[in-house]
Image: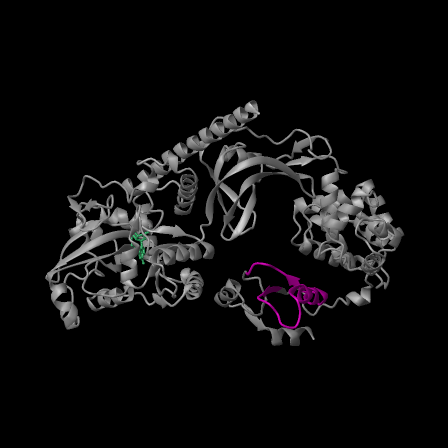
Amino acid sequence: MFFYYLLKLKMISANLKKVKERIEKLKNEINYHRYLYHVLDKQEISDAALDSLKHELDELEKQYPEFITSDSPSQRVGGLSLDKFQKVRHSQPMLSLNDVFDEKEVSDWQARIKKLLALKDQLNYFAEIKMDGLAVSLIYKNGIFTQGATRGDGYVGENITQNLKTIEAIPLKLEIEKLSSEFKEKAKKEIEIRGEVFMSKKALAELNDIQKKNKEQLFANPRNAAAGSLRQLDSQITAQRKLDFYAYSLVTDLGQKTHQESHRLIKSLGFKESSHNQLCHNLDEVFIYYRKIIKLRSGLPYEIDGTVINVNDNRFFEKLGVVGKAPRGAIAYKFPGIEKITRIRDIIVQVGRTGKLTPIALLEPVKLSGVIISRATLHNQDEIARLGVKIGDTVIIKRAGDVIPDIVKVLTNLRVGKEKKFEIPKKCPFCGFEVKRKKQEVDYYCLNKKCFATQRRGLYHFVSKKAFDIEHLGPKIINQLINSCLIKDAADIFSLTQGDFESLERFAKKSAQNLIEAINQAKKISLARFIYALGIRHVGEETAQLLAQQVMVNLKPKITNLKIMEVLKIFQNFLLEDLQSISDIGPVVGQSIYNWFDDEKNIKFLEKFERAGVEFITFQQQAVSDKFKNKTFILTGALQSMTRDKAKEKIRQLGGKISSSISKETDFVVVGDEAGSKLEKAKRLNVKILNEQEFLKMIK
Ligand code: IVH
């Protein structure tokens, strides 16, 4: 018993040591990036990645408060102030806001503050956009702008009055006369307004163009640009920088009762007010507001990085007070970062349909733009070398569009010395066969044509939507069939019996019957789909279509029943040059097709299909016409009367071609609902645009 406790104690203390070490490393890393960001106006990692680092530190400090030190980045308000400008002590500290990222965190915040206020009723909130810029304080005496300062460390900032005077959005004289009499007298004495200096997207792009021309460093974001421009000792430079200002708080108590009233006063005094600010009567309205702003975001002329939710009633706001560096009565409800940090647990290798080996990083799961991510692609050995990534590393991941994110950067300063190097294995992890890098390619391939993993992927592809599309037959059942040795290749699918399926786990008679029916139906297939299903390297959907058309052209008398062996003969008669000279099929693709039909194993494979009764939809059924000969179509948006695949099939049956990108060579763009940028491009290039009705008329 004693030894058991001793062992347990040892484990706990080892764990604590690790946590402490991690906290130290995180603190150093955050401090480093903060210094770059706040003092040098430089940036090595994105705001989102830095937020993510801070979040991990906050979480660890919450769990282990004994490790919080006064020098922790979580304990301070802003950055250091520079020596260049005169120092200014703020009347009240310039605070920051705590960040939240999802509805649950907002609800938790509401629960906390309602408890503190012992409040049962609904709280009202004033919701604002959160500008991405630099916080400043403006002091007006007798209505005249007398002093402007940066936040600095929150208590002492820099006097940048001259520079702020160059910003036209900042009034040099307030319109105190416009205030109602209850506010006027107090306002005359002294008023402090705080807000954000920012730069529009356009102004930032123009500034960066100039920086580029002058071979100077570019500004990564509006915050950097605003900071860089305000910290100019020569205010003439600031004046050229097209800065803007948005006021978000009236620090002086003029008797305003709500945050909304502060905004009204700020507006009357001569500042511009955002049309996107809104009073919300409960959290549901806050959530609707947040979603609305996300949608507006890309169309706004300036960058925002979230919303700010303020308790509207100033009495409550005051009562809630400040904790650490932030007021309790407001939060920054930020947009989900597209970058996060996480750790690599392991690196595995996936073997694709073509035998290609892809290294995949298994991650500690993190939420990235609303989705839990646990894998990231490392692409290939070159990418691993470029990143210098090791197992155990802390990395920044980013979603670029695909669900599988990329690794952007390794935070090498967070290493503990136990990270392990990774290299693509010399042998296939599935079949043990030799692995080789192809000439002039970055990828490694398993050379075993029968490789278990390769085959499995090939089979998934074979039954996929755009290939054989056999109802109910997806990867799960394919796995069961392979594991029970009922199939070895795709052709075996067509010799399966009802009894074969019934022998599998979780299969009843009815489901087995359904599958057999679906398989029988799939035995008649279009030639193009069949070619695509074969999974020949480089042969995608469009190339398969081109090849099918080429076969049709080579069928002299128009036959009605097209057998697999006849098609094979046509392919075997093609010379390499014939294939390579088909328009849109280049030398590499042509060679790949040629090699495939030249391989004895593949011929045996095709014979198996013929024996199992697979054949092509007859020539008449395919009804080739040349109505759309030499015409290229693009489809964009959703059609009402048919799926896009169906529309593509119609176009092809009439001899037309489908392309995915618009060029001058495009003849028609068929436009459905919610058509995107292609429609715009079509208009620009003067390409004929067809709506659904016009298209239907043409294909009739
Ligand atoms: S209220 C206690 N409202 O975001 C600070 N801040 O992350 C009160 N910011 O320091 C700030 N837009 O520089 C507020 N509509 C807005 C804002 C805003 C941008 C900045 C501000 C603040 C930082 C907090």
Q: How is the image coloured?
A: one colour
State the quadrant of the C terminus.
bottom right
Does the magenta portion include 646?
A: yes
Q: Which x, y percent locates residue 363?
A: 55, 40
Does the magenta portion include 247?
A: no
In the rendered image, the residue lying farthest to the front is 1
Q: Which x, y percent locates residue 378?
A: 56, 39
In the rendered image, the residue lying farthest to the top is 3
Compared to residue 492, the image places residue 119 above or below, namely below
Front one among 692 and 198 = 198
Task: Tell me if I can see residue 272 in this picture.
Answer: no
State the quadrant of the N terminus.
top right
Q: Which x, y percent locates residue 561?
A: 86, 61
Compared to residue 43, the image places residue 293 above or below, namely below
Snapshot quadrant of residue 297: bottom left
Please indicate whether residue 294 sits to the left or right of residue 563 in the image. Answer: left
State the residue at coordinates (27%, 40%).
39
Q: Ligand 1: which quarter?
A: bottom left
State the residue at coordinates (15%, 43%).
86
Task: Tell me if I can see residue 453 in this picture.
Answer: yes
Please indicate whether residue 556 sits to the left or right of residue 334 in the image. Answer: right
Tell me how many marks there are.
Answer: 0
State the residue at coordinates (47%, 55%).
104
Where does the magenta region start and end? 633-662
Q: Which x, y percent locates residue 27?
A: 37, 36
Compared to residue 198, the image places residue 672 above or below, namely below
Please indicate whether residue 137 sits to the left or right of residue 416 in the image. Answer: left
State the residue at coordinates (16%, 46%).
88
Front one among 466 and 151 = 151
Front one among 271 and 26 = 26
